[in-house]
Image (cartoon, helix red, strand yellow):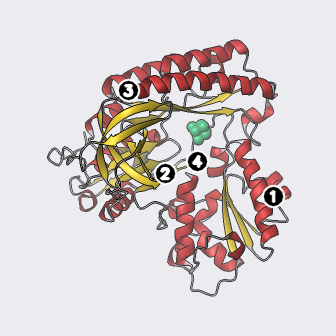
Amino acid sequence: MNVSDSERIAGCLEELGFVRTEKREKANTVIVTTCGVRQSAEDRAYGIIPKIKKANSSVKIVLTGCLAGRADVQKRLKDSVDIWLPINELAGLGKILRKRLEIAAPLARLGARNDRKGSLGGYLKINPKYESPISAFVPIGNGCNNYCAYCVVPYARGREVYRPAEDILAEVKGLIKKGYKEVILIAQNVNSYRSSVITQKTTGSLRRRSAPPQDDSGAVNFADLLKMVNDIPGDFWIRFATSHPKDMSEELIKTIAECEKACHQIHLPAQAGDNEMLRRMNRKYTREHYLKLLKKIRLALPDVSISTDVIVGFPGETRKQFKNTEKLFRQARFDQAYISQYSPRPGTAAAKLKNNVAKTEKKRREEALMKILRRTALANNKKYIGKNMEVLLEGTRKGIFFGKTKTGKNVRIKDVSNHPVGQFVMVKIKSAEDFGLEAVLENKTAPEPKRGGRRIFNRR
Ligand code: SF4
């Protein structure tokens, strides 16, 4: 999400007449998009920001993201930061920068229009400056209503706001026209997506409906949105994140299986494998629910790759409770996992609890999960050996091309020197590591993707 925020910030800066420089010492303005989800991310901001100011004392530093609204952070970085811009005020970025930095240029169109405090809807209308020419993040919403006990997101970003389906479809169509090969639909919880008004003009295949947003029977949900994006003509893949295990519906699983452009890669944060810990984290599902969900997903998408987030050492987590998380890891057979040692986030419910698991024990738990993960990921990857796969070439480093399969596996390819980055190619997988595959080029290009007739999608 922060990458996507930064792309929109860059788009706004360009509208104001700013030019990007790769050298911080030459910049007159630096905008830092901070993340406060983990202490390590927060520490990076404390390291980097004073360094920028020290190297270039005339630079104006704008701090946005999760940390911008925190009094303790403001106190700590008061000598380095010039403008504090909470993430839910990003809609007014253009206007704020123009005023505070005394920019003489006319007020940017977007900055002038979207200056409502707390309105992320306006911010999502800013034309982003995409970092990659191949793959683009497309935010479909922002904020979260779930209030997991350890998480700052609902406080930093506010409650859920979703983008109208028409705006999302227009952005995706524009990207495909420019030659993008992959769109990544993002929101804190894509499964809660709701949009109400769809016009035939935008979708080409949809009837107009005007159900109010709160009326679920008339609203467009995430499965509907996925079908609509899938129906946009062009050769491209669709990824999405993040899915909340309590909200992932059977309808969505079926839709992913039916949409030929939807990638079989699902990020499904488990956070813990013990029911008492899940209850205390306010996750609103059980380990049994999680495992049952995985079973349904794997039944519908046998080649799916599953990644997860997990926290070790949440306040009060006993060794016995942690063993249940180890067990979940073995049962779930994850392809990837982002394992975090718990750190209290100011303002959250868990911050009031005693952070009573020792650092060394957190480290031990992290390593124990990592060990299981490496085993399951390698076993999953070995199944790819000898298979022909379609890969999207993403770049080249030291003479080796790299790309991703539709299941999100990183692939290194040795012999594609004539193939420009941004193409789909067919490869044969030769070997597997824990978190990557090695392949050789199989055919010159990937076959045309199977395209059924354009589906006509009508609401039930
Ligand atoms: Fe945070 Fe929970 Fe919302 Fe995810 S679902 S963003 S962990 S509050």
Residue at image mark 2: 141
Alpha carbons under labels 4 and 1: distance apart: 23 Å
Three-letter code for the amino acid on which mark 3 is drawn: Ile
Q: Are marks 2 and 1 in contact (CB under 8 Å)?
A: no
Q: Which numbered mark, 3 or 2, is in the foreground of this view?
A: 3
Residue at image mark 4: 159
Q: Which numbered mark, 2 or 1, is in the foreground of this view?
A: 1
Q: Are marks 4 and 3 in contact (CB under 8 Å)?
A: no
Residue at image mark 1: 74
Residue 434 on image: x %, y %: 50, 30
Q: Which numbered mark, 4 or 2, is in the foreground of this view?
A: 2
Question: Residue 297's mark?
Answer: 3
334 versus 418 height, above or below: above
Q: Are marks 1 and 3 in contact (CB under 8 Å)?
A: no
Nearest the viewer among 145 and 52 is 52
Residue neighbourhood size for the residue with mark 1, other residues' Cα within 10 Å, grouped as few (<14), some (14–19), many (≥20):
some
Confirm or reject: label 3 Cβ below 8 Å from ligand 1.
no
Nearest the viewer among 344 and 422 is 422
55 versus 259 height, above or below: below
Query: Given the current orientation, which residue lies at the most extreme left position?
Result: 453
Three-letter code for the amino acid on which mark 2 is drawn: Gly
Q: Are marks 4 and 2 in contact (CB under 8 Å)?
A: no
Query: In the visual, does 67 lie left or right of 230?
Result: right
Q: Which residue occupies 49% across, 29% down?
A: 245
Query: Given the current orientation, which residue lies at the most extreme top position?
Result: 320
Three-letter code for the amino acid on which mark 1 is drawn: Gln
Alpha carbons under labels 3 and 2: distance apart: 24 Å
